Amino acid sequence: MDFKEKSISRKRFIKKALLAVLTIEVFWLLGRFFGFHKGKKRTDKLFDAGSIQSFEKGKFYFYRSQGFCLYCLDDGGFLAMDLKCTHLGCKVNFDRESQRFICPCHSSAFNAMGEVLSSPAYRPLDLYVVMLEDNRLKVDLSKAVKRSDFNIKQIFYHS
Ligand code: FES
């Protein structure tokens, strides 16, 4: 096979690959348009974290399979934080001694409220909405809420 033939077959391959990607994209868009990929109902994403009485103040509760952690603050408030690093999305680890979230990928660190202590991440950990239903703490996992800083209004308090 000479250079010209290789070049032509490479071009043909790229064209076919692009066509395949485009076809998949079109089918996916059509599926969305006709409702084949309906998202789960909001209630399906309401995660039941447990009875409100089961949480101890000042403790962190990890729901690793759901990808979040629930912090029960000393004053009884709750903060549900996504465990995905806001830099490039690696799962952060938690160092109990220093009460810091540390990313294994590029060493970003976050404090107990999810605020950035060291970059390259520049945004705090994302939050999930917490609510109380029938005396059970529920976390809405349908959408992680981005934030630029920590604000006391982000804490969920029950009466
Ligand atoms: S992905 Fe966490 S610091 Fe880069």
Image (cartoon, rainbow, N blue to C red):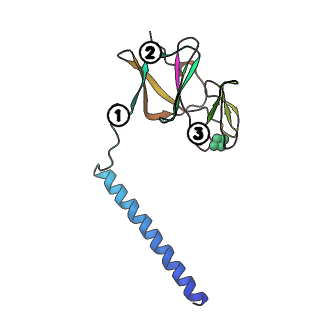
On whether residue 17 falls in the magenta region, the answer is: no
Mark 1 neighbour density, 10 Å: few (under 14) some (14–19) many (20 or more): few
Circle 1 residue? 44
- Image location (x, y in percent) of residue 63: 50, 30
For label 3, being within 8 Å of ligand 1 is answered: no
Depth check, front residue: 84 or 27: 84
Residue drawn where x is 42% and y is 68% of the image? 20
Circle 3 residue? 91
Circle 2 residue? 52
- Image location (x, y in percent) of residue 136: 39, 18
Q: Secondary structure under badge 1?
A: helix
Q: In the drawing, does residue 79 fall left or right of residue 26? A: right
Q: Quadrant of the C terminus?
A: top left
Q: In the drawing, does residue 62 fall left or right of residue 140? A: right
Q: Are marks 3 and 1 in contact (CB under 8 Å)?
A: no
Q: Amino acid at mark 2?
A: Ile
Residues rendered magenta in the picture: 73-91
Question: Quarter of the image holding residue 41?
Answer: top left
Q: Are marks 1 and 2 in contact (CB under 8 Å)?
A: no
Ligand 1: give its quadrant. top right
Q: Quadrant of the N terminus?
A: bottom right
